[in-house]
Image (spheres, rainbow, N blue to C red):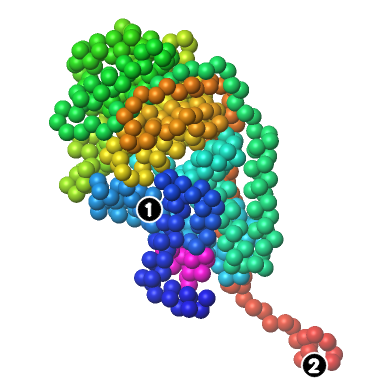
Amino acid sequence: MKTLGHWLASPWRRSAAAVLAGALPVLAFPSPALWWWAWVALVPWLLLARTAPGAKRAAYDGWCGGFGFMLAMHHWLLPNLHVFTFVIAALLGALWAPWGWVVRRLLGGAPSGGRVAAALLVLPSGWLAVELVRSWQGLGGPWGMLGASQWQVAPALRLASVGGVWLLSFLVVAVNVAVAVLVAVPRSRVPAVAGLVATAAATSAAWVWSPRPDTDERVAIAVVQPGVVAGRDSADRRFDREEQLTRELVGRDPDLIVWGESSVGFDLDDRPDLSRRLAALSRETGADILVNVDARRSDRPGIYKSSVLVGPEGPTGERYDKMRLVPFGEYVPARSLLGWATSVGEAAGEDRRRGDRQVVMDVGDGLRIGPMVCFESAFPDMSRRLAADGAEVLLAQSSTSTFQHSWAPEQHASLAALRAAETGRPMVHATLTGVSAVYDANGARIGSWLGTDASTARVYEVPLTHGSTPYVRYGDWTVHAALLILAAWAAGEGVRTVRLRRNARAPRVPPARTAHGSPARPGH
């Protein structure tokens, strides 16, 4: 330990260790998908921050760890954004600076049982506050929320139906804090063990008492994934391939056919020939087709990404315009200030336009679907709103073809499991080039993924459900509770600081002395 402490005495080595410690949790996400690793991955970072020589250094450890976490989580952006990826990671990493300071404040030195008990609530709450801030789509959205690493764990998905991915993040951080205390402060093991027991009890209670979705009928939903189509005239050739694959569904009686994001590269009003071909496909297959148009609109200025439902007579009028755009990929925030990003990477040359409302679409036979586009599936509030508005199936049309050979396609596909479990609604994640996936209302996968090497059309039997999960009914109560915990702790710290300052300023009055000079025993 002395050797390690001496090695960390160098600010540069300590900073490098913090960056590495912050990057460790990414192994819990796809593609490695070591879900169990998330429950201990923060321990090195916690141990580093608690031993910081001062409060400023602890905050810096938090910043460096946050930089490592953000860079590792978004490393697949490097070929496209280049140096700007490091800038984004550094800016977002600063959100963890206060968290590092709080780690040292509560766990530094030889913390009492009371401080450890407070840490088990305050540190997870602080982590949620960071996730809340960076969930704003202008800062990149909630990609890589710690709780999302548990997308394939049935008990965790049951917890998500109660408190959303937020509750999972809170519990994962709480367990990491407890393990760090057991490793570094064994004399305070009682509250640490109590925290672990409480987490197990919460998971068990959710498993037993949280309502399960009631299965109703089944619908057949087909996903059309054309695969990589690049080069000259790629939009026309992609449409041809999607048309060919869709025609293979004739006779298989799908209730709905879903194409991926940017599956149609032309406005359908400008290309009536494409509208006629889509209508013919709908008549041949006996199903409406949900396409995604990525093109300049003819009826209003600008480029939109729009989910458009096409029936036997052509576009039905059901349309959803994407609301939350990908920073730099689809627009450049503060373009006058950050527009230089287009010269060092593949940032958007022209900003896409935003839609202004979510839409629940009515498909044939009374089926109601809630479409989202691309990374909108990362936002739990969007799927929750669609479920509350009556959507029976959630849909995400996506394209991660730019990051085809990275971890991004699998990470993106895994998010649909969380959204399904949170809302108690099945979810279809349909892409151009993979990974496409379908999940039932419990977040369990239906059938197999369509990987990044697949070019096919596949029909999935999707069970419909009814009822409402606690998360849909009560929303982000975990976040509200976390903010209350932080406010209460901050108020307590403020009162404690005021008392200490008053005591420090109070004059020390010497004890009264008797005639014989003994303050303790008069007369002696």
Asked which secondary structure carries label 2, the reply is loop
Image disc number at residue 516: 2
Q: Give the range drawn in magenta.
A: 47-61
SS assignment for the magenta stretch, majority? helix
Residue at left 68%, top 55%?
194
Q: What element carries label 1?
A: helix
If the image is split into quadrants, where does the C terminus sit?
bottom right
Residue 234 location, quadrant = top left
Q: Residue at x 49, y 45 (%)?
A: 149
| Residue at (49, 29) in percent of width and height | 446
Residue type at numbered disc 1: Ala
Residue situated in front as seen by the camera: 281 or 330: 281
Asked if residue 4 is positioned above or below residue 437 in the image, the reply reads below
Magenta span contains residue 145:
no
For the point 49% across and 49% down, which residue is it?
A: 34
Question: Left or right of 402: which side holds 372?
Answer: right
Residue 510 visible, this orientation? yes
Return the x and y of residue 244 as percentages of the image width and height. Answer: 27, 19
Count residues near mark 2 (Cα–Cα under 10 Å), then give few for <14, some for 14-19, many for 20+: few
Query: Magenta includes 60?
Result: yes
> Which mark is on residue 72?
1
* Amino acid type at mark 2: His
The local crowd at label 1, few if under 14, some if 14 to 19, many if 20 or more residues have their Cα within 10 Å, is many
State the residue in front, 146 or 388: 146
* Mark closer to the observer (1, 2): 1
Residue closest to the eye, 49 or 244: 244
Q: x, y percentage for residue 367?
A: 47, 15
The quadrant holding residue 266 is top left
Q: Is residue 46 above or below residue 351?
A: below
Query: Horizontally, is 280 left or right of 234 in the view?
Result: right
Q: Which of marks 1 and 2 is nearer the N terminus?
A: 1
